[in-house]
């Protein structure tokens, strides 16, 4: 049964990918055809069998077009309700499309934010592709993920089908996802610096402990060592200065000290 399903899927994707060669000019067709095959390569057959080939083609090509130009360090995000008369394909769901540098936490962060907004997720397609871009960000080459060397950057292409949203809410969903992706990027970029800061604090506690009971120092050191031993996900950190005493004491954020999601002093 599984072999038959995979064979049926292969025939369907051949038809969808062939549409790129038939409909696009030669300069775009080859890359788009390869993109479509990579896009659907790991999608379970049952997730696409009910869709018309034109809609499968439209969904893949829409994400492909979104990713044709992107600057490293930024995410392209689109949230829309495709309609045949406008986009040439349709979906019963609102479509979220994201093209980004590949990094940890992307799918979990996006789906968690959608859940926080009370939006149901029906399907996630998330291939990680090897993409070479020109200096201006234009897509220059799509490599085979199995044979590409590590020098070819990895990019995340995400297609998410969610409960249909009214037109007036699409911008809100996009803005919230962009904010979450910015947080993910900040946490990932500063991860090593946050680990280094933890290690420096640990060394300071061991070499020059503050005037506290020995058992408290030992407990603090043990806790920091546990965190450092891959038991903690570093999202953000910052230092505070404490001024005053008692009820009048104030904690102030040290300027430009925050890392990760705590880069923002607010």
Image (cartoon, rainbow, N blue to C red):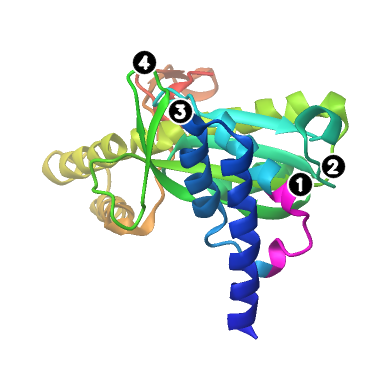
Choose the circle earlier in sequence order: 2 or 4. Answer: 2
* Residue ID for mark 1: 162
Mark pair 1, 4: CA separation? 38 Å
* Residue, far top: 255
**Tag 4 residue:** 256
Q: Nearer the viewer, residue 219 or 126?
A: 126
Nearest to viewer (mark 1 / mark 4): 1
Q: Position of residue 232 (x, y in %)?
A: 39, 53
SS under mark 2: loop
Q: Which circle, 3 or 1, is nearer the viewer?
A: 1
Question: Dividing the image into 4 quarters, which one contains the N terminus?
Answer: bottom right
Q: Residue furthest left?
A: 207
Q: Give the mark nearer the N terminus: 2 vs 3.
A: 2
- Which portion, as a residue range, is magenta? 46-56
Is residue 104 visible to the viewer in this orientation of the structure? no
How far apart marks 2 and 3 lie (CA) works out to: 33 Å
Q: Which residue is mark 2?
A: 164
- Answer with the quarter of the image where residue 223 lies: bottom left
Nearest-to-viewer mark from 2 and 4: 2
Give the x, y percent position of residue 242: 40, 21
Q: Is residue 166 left or right of residue 150?
A: right
Give SS at disc 1: strand
Question: In the rendered image, which residue does mark 3 sit on?
Answer: 262
Residue 54 included in the magenta stretch of the image: yes
Cα gap from disc 3 to disc 1, whole angstroms: 30 Å
Residue 208: numbered disc = none
The picture places residue 6, in percent across and down from the top left corner, at 59, 74
Q: Residues within 10 Å of mark 4 (few under 14, many from 20)?
A: few
Query: Under tag 3, what secondary structure?
Result: helix
Q: Quadrant of the C terminus?
A: top right
Residue drawn at x 48%, y 20% as measured from the top left: 264
Counting residues from the start of the chain, the first of labels 3 and 4 encountered is 4
């Amino acid at each position: 049964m599984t072999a038959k399903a995979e064979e049926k899927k292969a025939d369907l994707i051949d038809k969808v990918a062939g549409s790129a060669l038939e409909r696009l000019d030669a300069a775009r067709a080859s890359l788009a055809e390869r993109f479509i095959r990579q896009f659907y390569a790991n999608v379970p057959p049952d997730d696409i069998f009910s869709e018309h080939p034109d809609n499968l083609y439209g969904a893949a090509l829409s994400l492909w077009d979104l990713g044709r130009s992107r600057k490293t360090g930024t995410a392209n995000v689109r949230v829309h309700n495709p309609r045949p008369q406008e986009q040439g394909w349709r979906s019963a769901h609102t479509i979220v499309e994201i093209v980004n540098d590949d990094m940890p936490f992307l799918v979990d962060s996006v789906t968690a934010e959608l859940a926080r907004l009370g939006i149901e997720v029906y399907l996630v397609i998330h291939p990680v592709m090897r993409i070479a871009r020109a200096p201006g960000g234009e897509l220059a080459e799509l490599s085979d993920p199995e044979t590409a060397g590590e020098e070819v950057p990895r990019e995340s292409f995400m297609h998410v089908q969610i409960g249909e949203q009214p037109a007036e809410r699409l911008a809100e969903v996009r803005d919230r996802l962009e904010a979450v992706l910015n947080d993910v990027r900040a946490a990932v970029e500063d991860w090593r610096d946050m680990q280094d800061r933890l290690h420096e604090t640990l060394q300071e506690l061991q070499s020059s402990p503050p005037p506290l009971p020995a058992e408290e120092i030992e407990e603090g050191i043990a806790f920091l060592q546990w965190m450092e031993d891959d038991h903690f996900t570093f999202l953000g950190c910052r230092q505070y200065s404490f001024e005053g005493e008692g009820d009048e004491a104030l904690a102030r954020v040290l300027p430009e000290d925050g890392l990760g999601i705590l880069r923002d002093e607010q």
